[in-house]
Image (cartoon, rainbow, N blue to C red):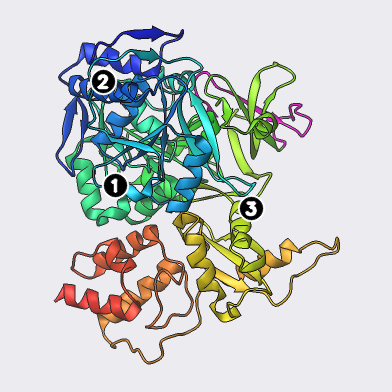
């Protein structure tokens, strides 16, 4: 089972880099799960992955096939990824937050041949007819294809401006580029690397493959929002985590509450959104990690394409944190609309080249041809990111914004047009307009709609109905938090919808809510005053009522983490983010805090 006959197909795959460590350090830990206590040595991981590869081959799955993976961060997830790759196939990680309808659409479009699911995964999450098996599956020896080079290793779906998500196809050579002699993050043999990302988020590529190809240990890890911040920080220390990748939003959350939390790390790589300069300096002034790196890279460039090491010296005199310099074997071009290079200091579109560039979009040749183009001067294939940048005098790249309406929210890449089209497709709206408002952890999606005259839903019930319908089609992070119902559509001078006016109307919807729940009163004591004050600070609300709901006011898991941490600093108790998210109202939270403090 672990030594099957193989069909050679050219350049080796990324799994062969893992196999080197199986030979060199078979008894070293490859995976350690601090939550379940489950651990696998390199020899055990290779054996388990070989069993799964054999089971897949027995189902007729091999080179060119796509296998969906519906697993959360765990030892089984690592086994599944490695087993699928050893079978010569490619894996498609599914977003655990995505509703069933979206999962079914992705699986139908991708034509996945099978799905690897966890023992506790609901079977009805998978559409009928899709063959499934667990990560524990085994089989007798089978002939396996040996994939590598240009063969796909995984496909990951991102939000699409056409109204449906698009699958990005990543080949073996792109992952090998990421893990071979990295200049942005070096992992030493035996070091522990936290696996904190949603498996459908492409940074998982770094957390798993960079670790296994370096002889390190993958540690499936709870996120900051799963525990109290104090418990999470203690777990980082107790598990001897050396390297961690965090979304920018989570980094900002910890940086402002516990800037010394990263002191025991050797590498901390942050990415997903614009890194806040003051938050970075706050961490560097406390007890910083040995290396703090701002990483940038679209999915189409395989997780990371540029990096900037943050130090007091490198940030001195800057107004923003740059996205920095190209990774190893990566080229970065700042080009104009005609794909000609623009002068240093001038804005242009960032186009990325090198072996880290994806093969394109699954089953979307038109979109692939539009975004993957030939750079005229070098004749290199480059990916047009849509990000506007400029080249600074020291050679670093600085992010300026987007050419289109794509936004980043808590690390997720979102095409606003996809949400707008989904809202209209519900049959509740004739037109929908979505914007991102606010910055950092307080950022949120808001929308306004022109009701469909044929709908029987009253205007007053439309926001709730839209939220419910979109929740069946989109993951939670893509569902707008609040809605403005229009009586008529603002029209600009061109006769089209006036998006500037609409954005202005949406911006007015944030920053507090009308007083509600007037029959609920807060006690006039120190605990109530403290909780209300911190609630308003975290949400940026100028007015608040005892009956207000945290989520309805713009709260999310990251803000809940901040609020829990701040309350615990002033009131001696144990409070988790879930306590805040599940509280019916401010008054309910005050009652919980009082009861826990007694």
Q: Earlier in the sequence, mark 3 or mark 2?
A: 2
Q: Residue 50 — which label?
A: 2
Q: Is residue 25 above or below residue 512?
A: above
**Residue 330: where, in percent of width, then height?**
55, 22
Q: Secondary structure at mark 1?
A: loop
Identify the residue at horizontal 57%, vertical 61% (top origin). Answer: 437
Q: Residues within 10 Å of mark 1 (few under 14, many from 20)?
A: few
Residue 65: x %, y % from top left: 45, 25
- Of the 4 image quadrants, the one containing the N terminus is top left
In this rendered view, identify the residue nearer to me: 204 or 378: 204
Q: Which residues are magenta?
A: 325-346
Helix, strand or loop for the magenta stretch, by majority: loop
Residue 474 is covered by the magenta coloring: no
The residue identified by callout 3 is 417
Q: Is residue 547 visible?
A: yes
The residue shown at (19%, 15%) is 25
């Amino acid at each position: 089972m672990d030594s099957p006959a193989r069909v050679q197909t050219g350049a080796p795959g990324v799994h062969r880099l893992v196999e080197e460590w199986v030979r060199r350090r078979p008894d070293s830990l490859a995976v350690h799960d601090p939550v379940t206590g489950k651990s696998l040595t390199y020899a055990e991981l290779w054996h388990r992955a070989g069993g799964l590869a054999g089971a897949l081959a027995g189902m007729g799955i091999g080179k060119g096939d796509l296998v969906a993976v519906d697993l959360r961060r765990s030892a089984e997830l690592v086994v599944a990824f490695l087993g699928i790759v050893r079978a010569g196939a490619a894996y498609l990680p599914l977003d655990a937050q995505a509703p069933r309808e979206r999962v079914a659409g992705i699986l139908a479009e991708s034509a996945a041949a099978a799905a690897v699911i966890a023992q506790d995964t609901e079977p009805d999450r998978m559409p009928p007819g899709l063959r499934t098996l667990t990560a524990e599956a085994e089989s007798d020896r089978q002939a396996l294809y040996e994939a590598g080079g240009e063969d796909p290793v995984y496909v990951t779906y991102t939000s699409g401006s056409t109204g449906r998500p698009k699958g990005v196809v990543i080949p073996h050579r792109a992952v090998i580029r990421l893990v071979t002699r990295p200049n942005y993050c070096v992992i030493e043999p035996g070091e522990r690397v936290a696996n904190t990302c949603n498996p459908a988020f492409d940074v998982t590529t770094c957390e798993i493959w960079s670790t296994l190809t370096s002889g390190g240990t993958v540690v499936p890890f709870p996120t900051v929002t799963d525990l109290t911040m104090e418990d999470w920080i203690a777990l980082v220390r107790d598990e001897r985590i050396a390297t961690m990748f965090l979304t920018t939003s989570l980094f900002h959350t910890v940086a402002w509450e516990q800037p010394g939390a990263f002191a025991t790390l050797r590498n901390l790589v942050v990415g997903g959104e614009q890194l806040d300069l003051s938050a970075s300096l706050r961490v560097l002034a406390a007890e910083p990690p040995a290396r703090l790196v701002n990483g940038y890279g679209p999915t189409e460039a395989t997780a990371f394409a540029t990096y900037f090491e943050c130090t007091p010296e490198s940030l001195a005199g800057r107004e923003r944190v740059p996205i920095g310099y190209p990774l190893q074997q990566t080229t970065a071009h700042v080009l104009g609309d005609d794909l000609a290079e623009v002068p240093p200091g001038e804005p242009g579109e960032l186009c990325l080249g090198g072996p880290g560039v994806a093969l394109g979009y699954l089953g979307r040749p038109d979109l692939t041809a539009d975004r993957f183009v030939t750079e005229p001067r070098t004749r290199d294939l480059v990916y047009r990111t849509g990000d506007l940048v400029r080249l600074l005098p020291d050679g670093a790249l600085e992010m300026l914004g987007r050419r289109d309406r794509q936004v980043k929210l808590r690390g997720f890449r979102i095409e606003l047009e996809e949400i707008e089209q989904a809202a209209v497709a519900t049959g509740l709206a004739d037109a929908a307009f979505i914007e991102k408002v606010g910055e950092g952890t307080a950022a949120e999606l808001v929308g306004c709609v022109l009701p469909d005259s044929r709908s029987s839903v009253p205007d007053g019930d439309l926001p709730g109905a839209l939220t419910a319908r979109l929740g069946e089609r989109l993951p939670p992070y893509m569902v707008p938090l609040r809605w403005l119902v229009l009586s008529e559509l603002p029209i600009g001078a061109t006769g089209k919808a006036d998006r500037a006016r609409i954005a202005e109307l949406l911006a007015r919807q944030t920053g507090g809510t009308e007083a509600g729940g007037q029959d609920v009163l807060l006690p006039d004591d120190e605990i109530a005053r403290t909780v209300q004050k911190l609630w308003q600070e975290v949400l940026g609300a100028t007015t608040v009522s005892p009956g207000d709901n945290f989520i309805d006011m713009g709260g999310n898991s990251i803000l809940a983490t901040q609020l829990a941490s701040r309350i615990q600093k002033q009131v001696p108790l144990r409070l988790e983010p879930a306590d805040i998210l599940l509280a019916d109202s401010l008054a309910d939270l005050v009652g919980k805090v009082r009861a826990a403090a007694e």
